[in-house]
Amino acid sequence: MAISSSRPEAESPAPEDGTARRLLDSSARLSYDPLTEVDWQTPLDESFHGTSPEWSTLYGTEYWNELTDAQRKELTRQEAASVACTGIWFEMILQQMVLRDVYAKDPTDDTVQWALTEIADECRHSIMFARGARKLRAPAYRPRRTAVELGRLFKTVAFGEAAYASILVAEEVLDVMQRDWMRDERVVPFVRTINNIHVVEESRHMKFAREETRKHLARAGGVRRRIHSLVIAVASYVIVTSMVNRKVYANAGLDEARALREAKANEHHKSMMRSSCSGLMDFLASAGLLTKPALFFYRRAHLI
């Protein structure tokens, strides 16, 4: 969108500022209030799944074939809640990194105002995910202690392309899953609404993360680029492997040890993850962030 003609020509914004203005305009036109958009009042209908069954960590395994329809639906509801809780954890990290990035910058600048808008979005998303998990009758799933402490370190020290590319990885992986879930009539309606809200609003966040990653990489030397490519890959591995908490199986009434073994060996789920991340990996490759050390962690997370 063109900048107001009252601004002097010499003060025309940089390209990334133009992106920020367009994102602000988009947010003004299309944003949601989850407190009113999501049906929080209707009791949970247990005849629905929580995610598309094909996205379950056990789909395609022998154990899945042995489960009753009710057990499968309960498992996907617990998995949906776990993904939501992991999303809250990472959104808290994201908010702190973005706020730290714009600290002491000009608050009248479009880029800073968009960053604050994104933080406001993430606050609403976190509350929405928390209420959704509670309505799915799930506990507050939390990442393992090692992941929590690594996240604490990462949010404190990560900057530039390391912060924004890691944000992009987390958002892209979740985005692909949720696009399937929001269209799937087998998924409980209020979860479909949550997914739709998140997909629409996160599309703007991903655009900003790509722009910021490119902008910071343009100033990065070879050594910094190699170091940050590894940091991004490790962060991605921790995020992706934390999405489904091991306790979902016991809470769904399954044998946790057996479920874990079959989930870890599930080639169908690995294939789903790889196919969903093809566009993301293309972006990271074009940015020069798929170094050999980084590829090791992406392969371990089954993202490539």
Image (tube, rainbow, N blue to C red):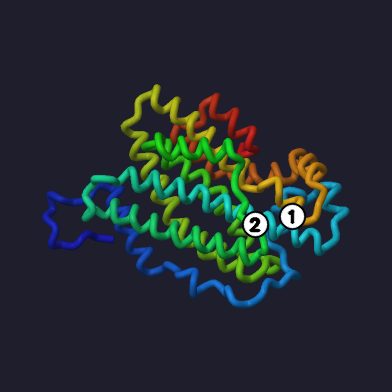
Residue 92 placed where, x, y %? 46, 50
Residue 304 in view (yes/no): yes
Q: How far apart are labels 2 and 1 at the CA level?
A: 9 Å
Left or right: residue 124 versus residue 248 is left
Q: Residues within 10 Å of mark 2 (few under 14, many from 20)?
A: some
Q: Quadrant of the N terminus?
A: bottom left
- Depth check: 200 or 5 in front? 200
How many marks on residues? Answer: 2
Q: Secondary structure at mark 2?
A: loop
- Say what amino acid the circle numbered 2 marks: Pro
Q: Is residue 127 above or below residue 89?
A: below
Q: Residues within 10 Å of mark 1 (few under 14, many from 20)?
A: some
Residue 270 position (above or below residue 248): above
Q: Residue furthest bottom?
A: 42
Residue 241, quarter of picture: top right
Say what amino acid the circle numbered 1 marks.
Answer: Asn
Question: Which residue is tagged 2?
Answer: 139
Quarter of the picture containing the C terminus is top right
The residue nearer to you, when weighing 259 against 303, is 259
* Residue 253, image x, y percentages: 80, 55
Q: Residue furthest right?
A: 66
Q: Is residue 281 visible?
A: no
Q: Which residue is mark 1?
A: 251
